[in-house]
Image (tube, grey):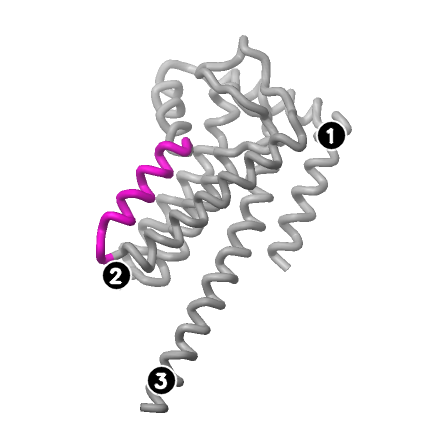
Amino acid sequence: MIIGGALLCFACIAYWVSSAETLYFDTAIREWVYSCRNGLLNAIFIPVTYMGNWQTITLLALILLAVPAVRYRIGLPFAVISLASTGIYKLVKELFQRPRPELTVRLIEQGGYSFPSGHSMNCIVCYGILIYLLRRYCPNKQTANVLTVLLSLLILLIGFSRVYVGVHFPTDILGGWSLGSAFLFLCIMILERIRGDRDDLSVYYRDHR
């Protein structure tokens, strides 16, 4: 149901974007966000937006893969899912080919197409799956809870930052989050199935020694 609802939401946003029916919505939110700009917020949201870059995600994946204690349970699924998410959003961008906002409103340089936001999709997939894996395997539940809150906040801030720095429309962010949510829960279902099959095999071998 969650996957279906997220895909339906993405389909609706994609239709509105394709039919140019989002102009008033995007314009109203962008004008409000741009009106909030100041030196302090620039110093916060420009670094925050880079937390969703593929370079940051790749570095995090390499760190998790390099630590033996979390390599297979967390690092490997995180790396594979992150790579798949990147491939999907790049393909979808090519399908829609929506131009980015005008250069005059941008605080950073950014190439490529606008819809859906790759940062927003990648963040909800990559940091979302990290939340799932931490809550599944972290022995300290208090630590898992704190990291869940921090990573969830980071997902929201990165999405907002993409509009703030002027490289995305609000509907790009919503599209990225909705498509990313569908892919995230699909990945969780697959991981749960793999884990269930592994547990079944463990029980089988234990009972047939």
Q: Earlier in the sequence, mark 2 or mark 1?
A: 1
Per the rendering, the mark at residue 205 is 3
- Residue identifier under label 2: 140
Q: Is residue 69 left or right of residue 29?
A: left
Residue 78 in the image: above or below residue 97? below
Residue 141 in the image: above or below residue 90? below
Q: Which is more toward the observer, 114 or 202? A: 202
Q: What is the CA distance from the residue labelled 3 to the residue labelled 1?
A: 54 Å
| Secondary structure found at label 2 | loop
In the rendering, at what x and y percent does residue 91 appear? 59, 36
Residue 190 in the image: above or below residue 46? below
Residue lying farthest top?
Answer: 104
Q: Earlier in the sequence, mark 3 or mark 1?
A: 1
The reply to whether dot 2 and dot 1 touch (C-beta < 8 Å) is no
| Secondary structure found at label 3 | helix
**The disc labelled 1 sits on which kind of residue?**
Ser
Q: Residue 78: say if magenta.
A: no
Q: Which is more toward the observer, 26 or 74? A: 74
In the rendering, at what x and y percent does residue 199 appear? 40, 76
The reply to whether dot 3 and dot 1 touch (C-beta < 8 Å) is no
Q: Quadrant of the N terminus?
A: bottom right
- Residue identifier under label 1: 18
Magenta-drawn segment: 53-69
Q: Quadrant of the C terminus?
A: bottom left
